[in-house]
Amino acid sequence: MTWPVTWNVTSRFCRMSMRGSITSHRKQTDAWRLRVYLGKDPATGKERYRSKVFHGGKKDADDLLNEMISEVKTKENLSSKMTLEQLLTEWLRFCRNKGLAVKTISDYEWRSRRHIIPELGSTPINDLSAKHLDDYYGALRAKDYSSSTIRHTHAIMRQALGQAVKWGWLNRNVALLATVSAPMPILGIAPRLEQLKAIIAEMSSSNPQFAAMIALAALTGARRGELLALHWSDVDIENSVLWIRGSLVYTKDSGVVLGPTKTKRARKVPLDQVARVVIQRQMQELEAACAKLEIAHVDNPWLFFGEIDGSKSLFPDSVSSAFRRVTKRLGIEDLHFHSLRHFTATQLIAAGVDIRTVSGRLGHSDPSVTLRVYSHVLEDNDRAASDIMGRLLSP
């Protein structure tokens, strides 16, 4: 509520101090405007105030003004002494309470400990400037850190300092003024079809279950964690549908944790005949293993099982490690398990499937993500389209 004209500074009551003022309303005896000085804005140089209208007695208004002044002083004292390391600790606690993915929190913590705290951790947050950050990013580049590492580090700085502004510990976010190189286009490296077939054949001889997971990853475009999180109840063979509802991740601090998908939304992936056969054989493998040992599997087993009764999923990193060993044996470089998602996307786009459908199958939050990651494939399609039009109008 505001009082643009009716405040009377002199007629009834006005008390001012160096930090705040209390002013009565001309006509309403129980209305008071409380105003606290916040200092000058470092960016604009303008003086800043916090105002509040209070209805009640003069003594209560006085007490509230003192509380407001004390709160401002407390925030100033806290922010003047707080270091960047202390801010990052508070911000990471806030991120955990907000319910961010375990893998995301783990990445934030690792980058903070590895890159930010050793260099800038002892710096008071009020002393940080854009120049500090520019020099720091330049030092990382001089040490041959990738542009991706620098951008991820900058993202942590921007979010943590931005939260400090929201908490009233800082007047502005200097990370917004720092200079970071533009991101390089993301080029997803995908295996060629003959390479993928060779990888699956090689893996089948040593670990058929890993081979099945590789095949299903290439057929559906699902992430590693999403495949490992599958239970039998997520498979609808009759309607040829696979439900992806969660993701299994591993961190050193938390161990193996079942969480939501990256977009925090479940999605339905239609299954072709080959994918159905892969899944059914995987289920039959578990049943055969249990029958051999004369034990029963659990009611709703994991599809890719780490225990013979299906009570536990495969360990996440074991699949990726096995994939790298096989590709190394075959002399195929620069491929990792995530490359199977790129295989799915590039094959579908090259076949003319629309971006929205591809995006939904991959579980991207927005089709623009798919466009950005696979723009190089679209450029190839555009060239092919030009050739088609040229042939149509050729003499």
Image (cartoon, helix red, strand yellow):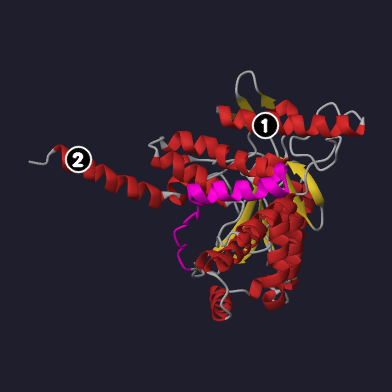
In which quadrant will I find the N terminus? top right
Q: Nearer the viewer, mark 2 or mark 1?
A: 1
Relative image position of residue 147 (x, y in whole percent): 52, 68
Q: In front: 43, or 192?
A: 192
Relative image position of residue 269 (x, y in whole percent): 58, 30
Q: Residue at x 43, y 38 (%)?
A: 355
Relative image position of residue 3 (x, y in whole percent): 56, 43
Pointer 2: residues within 10 angstroms few (<14), some, or many (20+)? few
- Of mark 2 and mark 1, the one earlier in the sequence is 1
Q: Residue at x 52, y 45 (%)?
A: 4
* Mark 1, secondary structure of its residue: helix
- Give the residue at the far left of this rendering: 395
Q: At label 1, which amino acid type do we have?
A: Ile
Q: In front: 261, or 174?
A: 261
Residue 211 on the magenta span = no
> As displayed, is residue 188 above or below residue 239?
below
- Give the residue at the far top of this rendering: 238
Residue underneath mark 1: 279
Residue underneath mark 2: 389
* Mark 2, secondary structure of its residue: helix
- Give the residue at the far right of this rendering: 294
**167 to the left or right of 273:** right
Q: Residue at x 79, y 39 (%)?
A: 305
Residue bounds of the magenta highlight = 181-210
Q: CA distance from mark 2 to mark 1?
A: 42 Å
The label shown at residue 2 is none
Residue 215 image-quadrant placement = top right
Q: At label 2, which amino acid type do we have?
A: Met
Q: In front: 307, or 139?
A: 307
Residue 127, can we see it?
Answer: yes
Residue 43, can we see it?
Answer: no
The tally of labels here is: 2
